[in-house]
Image: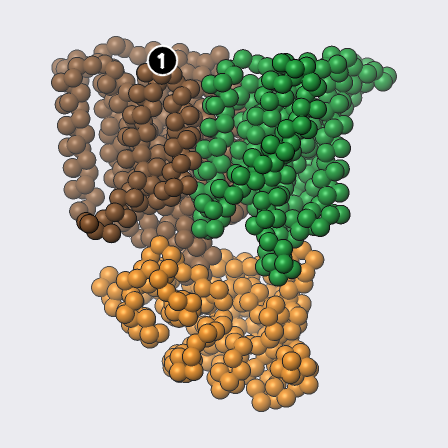
Amino acid sequence: MTALLHVDNISKRFGGFVALDGIDLEVQPGERLGLIGPNGSGKSTLVNCICGTLRNETGSVRFDGQVIDGLAAHQRTHRGVARSFQLPRPFHSMSLADNLRIPLLYTVRAREGMLHAHSDLGARCDELLDLVGLAAKAKQIPRDLTQVEMRKLELARAMAAEPKLLIADESMAGLSHSEIDDILALLLRLNEQGITVILIEHIMSAVMSFSQRLAVLVSGKKIADGKPEDVVRDEHVVRAYIGQ
Amino acid sequence: MNTLSFSAIATAVGLAVLAFAQWLGLDYFYFAGYTILQFIVLATAWNILGGYCGYVNFGTAAFFGLGAYTTVFMYKLYPLPIPLLMLMSAVVCGIVGFGMGYLTLRLRGAFFSIATLAMAVVVQTLVINWDFVGGSRGAYILHPENLEFAGLKVNYIVYLFVLMLILAVVALASARAIERSQLGFGFATIRDDELAAEACGVPTLRLKLIATTLSGAFMGMAGAPFPYYIGYLQPQSAFALDYAVNSIAMPMIGGTTSWVGPLVGAVLLGSAQQYATVTISSAVNLLIVGLMLVAFVIIAPNGLIGLVQKRLRRGPP
Amino acid sequence: MDITWDLLANAIVAGLLLGGFYAAVTAGVSISFGMLDIVNIAHPAFIILGSYIAYFINIDFGIDPIVVSILVLPAFYALGALVYQVYYLSFEKRGQESLRGLAFFFGLLFVTEVSLILVFGVDYRYVEAAYIGPSIHIGLIELPLRMLVPCGVALVLFGALELFVTRTFIGRAIKAVSQDQLALQLMAADPIRIKRIAFGISIATASIAGALLVIIQPVEPSVGRDYIGRVFAICVLGGLGSLPGTLIAALLLGVVESLTATFYGPSWAPAVAFGLLLVTLAFRPAGLMGR
């Protein structure tokens, strides 16, 4: 089975600082991958390079069998890669419902053969907001939301793009236990529908219960990649991240 | 209200203004009115890229001047009726807008703005050194005092006034249509957060290019009749930086998020400047524009429209 | 042949002297735009303000313009700090610096220029000093003192700034704030205060640059507009945040402009800076020594 996402030896520097140093990563279709590592280890940079927000200097990224290195971020989203931002970036002049309408209009409708009537769009926005528990605030603007609610909006907006691969970048920071369970259940349901999920988190319990496979990033290098129960016992991982 | 109805209403308002002008019988009204209508077009055009997308263009003068010099060029070659010249200017400036956008829109907003300033000077320098259109010596554009329209004898300035009125209606209707369309929705995401817009699948470069091209085309159309209006055109007046400050100040003061803002700003600021020029001096009117720009940008970032909206939201006491 | 070499050599030397002066003019923007990310397009207006103050005091009291500019340094610094404070409260804090911040400075540019027109009129103004007029001759090369002295002062200014940024705590804090504001905060330095100091210094340099300008050429209020493009062209070409890069870019621009003016005529000179800027932005936005 060919991998859905194939990251091949990518590196990225900012001036003199090496953010990513030769990262290799494969994600199979339908897989649930957990990505962990200390702050500043390069997790978000990796996401940015996969999604096209940043350009990697070496190596290449293959998605769904095709090299996507030259593609702009919006083209990658059209191909089926969606992500939430670690620091939420809502469209602050629009209501929550309109925030979700954007990926519906520009990604879902832009894909060939998918046409929704205007009323369907509104219903779909409400449906998505309901999935993350924000249905009551559909007409409010992002400024009125709490940090936690903004993260949920981020996740809903990524889901709205109907991706093949969903990358959730620290969507659960600050959530209560029951809220974490809700989001995990949601991601699990999406996965059962066929969506591949990469979960980037610091909350170990969530990562362990969700991931089929776990990868660990430290200082721009991948130091472990395998079954979750094996990885957390790996001495390098314990030293670098868990046993701090 | 759809675009057609809006255009009809706007045209009716325009006709009312024209009727009022005829009744007044003052030539000055047409001259001053032309200037204000011109500002409405420039402010509206600027706002498509500036207010809707969040990209500040300092080079209004470049497009306006190019439009004016397209007319001069054709005048020396083979005089054409002004509406045709306006269309030509639209094409020329649209292409230039597209080209400039293609080179610079991939950069951050601040770099884009500086590039527009650079472009304005480059274009001006090219024109100054182009003898065919008169260079720095300037060019004289002659026109008949009156025109014949279906048996009616029309004063030339009235003709120019009507042309600019039509252009203003088209510009306002277009801006309004864009604002309410999916395109305008996409523009807003670019303004709010371009990175997030890209991640949501919005083709930001393509949309920005559309905005730049449209904006440039309208500015060029506003410039096309200018040589006929002024009679003697020099590069300094066609490419004056004053056009830049006005086309930025008017939407900022009126309000940048909707088509109403540039209209309000142009009418208010334009009238204020006309008054100042006549009663005090023309240097003072630029001081007024500058001061109002600074004041509004600090105190009322969403312009007059924003202030009104805040009042309405708070409700009657 | 002799005449051409003579012309060429003098054009290059004149360009280098001019370039040195341009470096002084750009130093302030190198700090405000290069390090603080503030697009202060009104900087040339502050320079012209400095020119007029130098002119005014020179004509009325006979004090050397450069000395005047140094005497009014504190006032310019205070002005810079005040402008930054307004900018910060109105725009940076609200996250609206891209659109409204730019419009703010553009408005300031106009207000300053028009105010000068209303007070001083549009006549060209000159200063008087002992070194305006005589030249030094070295072989074929003519070095007019009115260009040489400003160039020298400019290089001293530049050197002082470079030392400040690399050797003093506040200087290094300014460099740091351009790279990582959060880290700076964690080091118990107030980034807003640092930025205010930096912007104040940036405007203070305008005082000196203004005096140098009015020595080199006669000044009238709209002269500032010619410098907007030059200043940003040099900044971008040299690489944002790099003072040595700015110096090299300034010298380069000076030489190219001088050669253009000598061989193609002065009416093409304004396009040089702006054309160079467009080319750099289109093909190598990071500049020669960019971050």
Give how far across and how far down residue C204 sits, in percent.
63, 34
Q: Which chain is orange?
A: A
Chain under numbered label 1: B
Towards the viewer: C43 or C22: C43
Residue A183 position (above or below residue B115): below
- Label total for image: 1
| Residue shown at 65% from the left, 60% from the top | C187
Nearer-the-camera pick, A19 or C158: C158
Q: Give x and y (percent) for residue A75.
A: 45, 60
- The answer, for residue A87, to whether it is visible in the render is yes
Locate residue A48, reporting x and y percent.
54, 64
Residue at horizontal 40 percent and vertical 60 percent from the top: A90
Residue at position x 56%, y 35% in the image: C79
Q: Residue furthest right?
A: C139
Q: Is residue C49 above or below residue B207?
A: above
**Horizontal arrangement in the rendering, residue B63 relative to residue A39 (left or right):** left
Which image quadrant for residue A54?
bottom right
Answer with left or right where residue B42 lies relative to residue B126: left
Give the image's coloring scheme: by chain
At horizontal 72% and vertical 30% (from top left) the residue drawn is C154
Q: Chain C's colour?
A: green
Residue C99, given in percent of the width and then of the height, sits at 44, 43
Choose top left, top right, bottom left or bottom right for residue B265.
top left
Circle 1: element type: loop
- Chain for colour brown: B
On screen, residue B99 versus residue C198, left or right, reads left
Residue B160 appears in the figure: no
Residue B184 or B209: which is nearer the viewer? B184
- The residue type indicated by label 1 comes to Gly
- List the residue tagged with mark 1: B231
Q: Is disc 1 surrounded by few (<14), some (14 to 19) or many (20+) residues within 10 Å?
A: few
